[in-house]
Amino acid sequence: MTHPDWLAAMDVLAYMILPALLTDNNLEDLIYTEMVNLSLKHGNCDASCYAYASFMVPLGLRFGDYGAGRAFGELGLALVDEHGLDRFKARVYTCYSCYVVPWVRHLPESISLTRRAIEVGLAAGDLVYAAATAKSLVSNLLVSGEHLRVVEGEATQFLALANKAGFGLAADSAIGQLLLLGELRGAVGTENNALPARSSFLQHLQGAGAPLVLPLAWYWIQEIQARFLEGDFNAAVEAEYEACKVVGATRSFIDLGEYHFYGALAHAAACTDAPEEERLLHLRSIHAHQKQIGVWAESCPENFSNRLSLVSAEIARLEGRDLEALELYEQAASSASRYGFVQNEAISNELASRLYTSRGLTTSADALLRKARDGYAKWGALGKLRQLDRSNPDGEPPPRLASTGTPGNHLDMAAVMEMSQAVSGEIVLDRLIERLMVTVVEHSGAVRGLLLLSPDAEMQVVAEAVTDHKGVSVSLSTSGGVAFPETVVSFVNHTREVVILDDAQQADLFSGDVYFQQFGSTSILCLPLVKQQQLVGILYLENSLSSHLFTEDQVAVLRLLASQAAISLENAALYREAQETNERARRAAEELRVSYDMIPAQAWNTEPDGLYPAFNKQWHDYTGISPESARAGGWVDSYHPEDRDKVVRKWTELVQTGTAGEIEARIVRHDGVSRVFLVRGSPMRDETGAILKWFGTHTDIDDLKRIEEAQEVLARAGRLTALGELTASIAHEVNQPLMAIVMNAATCLRWLSEDQLDVDEARQAAERIIRDGHRAGDVITSIRALARKSPLIMEDVDVNAMIEDVLVLTRGELQRHGITLQKVLSAGAGSAIGDRIQLQQVVLNLILNAVEAIGSSENGLRRLQVTSELSGNGKVSISIADSGPGVEPAKLDQIFEAFFTTKPGGLGMGLSICRSIVEAHGGRLWVSPNEPDGSVFSFTLKAAAT
């Protein structure tokens, strides 16, 4: 697509999509359809990819053609990745992962695309769209069966991003997700004190009305899931009724699948003990949900076959087809396990266990319940594990993983999970160490505990935990004076084996340690923290109050925790190192930014594609344009309206060719005044030649341009003055050919008369007329050239011919003053590079100055010599030597300064202008004494290439 009108129309439609999504589903579908039709008719552009990736919404979710929706989505993705139509890259990735993948591909495949979309959005400064994309990432992770701790971490980052972007709708979406995750995880290892209560949050959503209908729909869907897993099935059904009123707002998100799935399960659970008149309503709702899930299971069995089997099993159970129900539960669990939906596998086993229990088959029921518990534990749903404990029909706690051997101090699976997640839930090193020490000491019965780490290849105590009447207190970064049995720690450090001492003073191997003799500790446990065969740290626990405290069973549990602690400690250390690195990078970036702003010129840089420019403070102060406006394209407005098009064309050319360049343009100051700047841009490349960034500067040359204009005015005035001085000579030069023309015309007429007819003589006279006419014309042309105001034209100038043209104008002046002219023009002088008119002005001024000097001299010898030759180093040299009084040695340098003159009526500008012209041509002008009398003014020019 190349036509600007259609491109503009596609852009307008593209930016209407998000508002339409939040307000009018029909308008949203019409926009997608119109964009696709325009693309098919007029060709593809960047916005076409956005439409193709979103076309699943009307094609699949509205009309059921999921195959065509997938094809269009993959087309949009291919155009971005393979054909470079990537202006809407973040949105294409988001829409494909959100609208296409859930309904036709395995859901975890969306995660990498969604993360890439967030990265692209953040890189482009599009925080709003990055926050919107983060919501889909959290939902897809949750539905995919990712560990809830990981999902909660992503949701927390999502909330922070939404708040940073000032995107209230996204922030409310994140709060709803965090409230659900908090319930599922049992609020272990999280800090939900900053979140509102569910009741107040619901009032906030309902009070906002239409603007927050989307997060309200998500809230009710999350409420169905939370209440169903909690076992409050009637509340789950009530939430399904509320969700049904607003679920149309979320028709294109995976949350719609959760609505139908948990809605069906909630109705099935409530239907079990419902009155007959309510059972029909429940069954009708279940079948409606099953029908929609069946459509999705056909287009994407990876995501929905387990859900369809589970809902079908519940229908079979309610209809008394127990054997078929059990087969369907098994199918659901098998499919969920195969595709990684760990939570759905656990739900399938739990519901199958209930059916076995209702039929009195307790052995099978207990086995399936244990599998369900394992699944929920693997998911990280501690809240659900506690709900299963509370709902145990016999009132017995579930099986224990291990025990300490001490009555009343058992460690069941939920406790182990709490300990593990309490440790793994921290990433800040100091908080992690504190939580680890408190958790271990509390659950082991130790009175004192030490954590040793090796930051410098030597084990050092970094934390000490002590139990007293107030609880466990932890001291971090302890000094070297902490006492402990060095022999025990050294043994563990070298062997990486666990040491358990039931009575340390009676232990043969370690009883001689000075620590035991001095402090008399009894029960000792020292175990290594190992990750991938590498010793990360050592955990030392002691109890001086009782012996035989630590058992092998307890060590087995603490080994699990130690393994997680080793991983968490290393991760936390890496996180701290990353934070310190980021802080150093931030300070370096800030220092660079300050230095950048202190550059005494306007500076800027852009991305490799030339977009999103960043300017320094000098530019912002001058233009008055904000950084946000500049990055959004407002930098173009800083240029004078008449210069904008040429600047944009030049910049586009540089970006497309990847070359450095410059242009002169006027930049408008914040008060409306325009000044001329030299705008330069240059790419920075990596070792492969790829452009990493563009850098540029704006140099104020307005004063320089004004000086150049003034110099041009002065130079022209000098030429006119010189011509004025040559008026008599010019009149003589023109008069001579005119008189010759008159005489030759009379001669021609005479030879054409009848009495003296001679055609050959007449022809010769006519030829002399033509020659003299050209001669007069050349004189007039030279005068006009010197007098007119014309632009600088750098070209190859024949040096000798240029000198001859000037001598034609000055011949009469030389004759009038009785000056003998000597021309020493070398045939090898060749051509020089320069502007013919300006070079003639230099020669003319120097000859006229020489005539004046000779005229003021009392020396009887009146001679002027003009010389040209090709000197070394590719230079052409021109000299004008006179026999005048010469220049005093003290004034040899001053004579070229502006307003310095040796003539009573002089302005002191002639030689200054001459030097400026010569230096502008890359040459040099100087004066030296002439022998025996007078001065020699010489200058050089760059020789033209031969």
Image (spheres, rainbow, N blue to C red):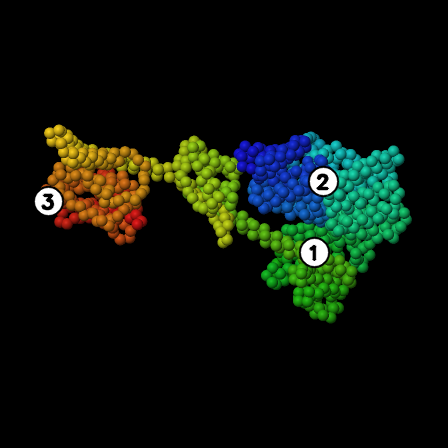
Foreground tag (1 vs 2): 2
**Which residue is painted at 27% across and 41% down in the image?**
836
Q: Residue at x 21, y 40 (%)?
A: 806
Q: Position of residue 201 (x, y in %)?
A: 70, 36
Outermost residue toward the left?
860
User: CB of mark 1 within 8 Å of CB of mark 2?
Assistant: no
Instruction: Give the CA distance from mark 3 to mark 1.
Output: 109 Å
Circle nearer the N terminus (3, 1): 1
Examine the image and state in which quarter residue 697 appears: top left
In the picture as drawn, the residue positioned furthest to the right comes out as 360
Viewer-nearest residue: 362 or 650? 650
Q: Amino acid at mark 3?
A: Leu
Furthest-bottom residue in view? 508
SS state under label 1: helix
Which residue is more in the foreground, 236 or 393?
Answer: 236
Q: For marks 1 and 2, give the CA distance.
A: 33 Å
Give the residue at x 22% y 43%: 803
Q: How many marks?
A: 3
At which x and y percent is residue 31?
A: 63, 33
Residue 111 vs residue 631, the one in the foreground: 111
Pair 3/1: label in front: 3
Residue 350, position in %: x, y?
82, 47
Q: Earlier in the sequence, mark 1 or mark 2?
A: 2
User: Quick one: 312 or 931, which is closer to the camera?
Assistant: 312
State which mark lies toward you, 2 or 3. 3
Q: Amino acid at mark 1?
A: Gln
Identify residue type, mark 2. Asp
Q: Which residue is mark 3?
A: 861
Q: Is residue 145 left or right of residue 748?
A: right
Mark number, residue 255: 2
| Label 1 packing within 10 angstroms: few (<14), some (14-19), many (20+) | some
Mark 3: secondary structure? loop
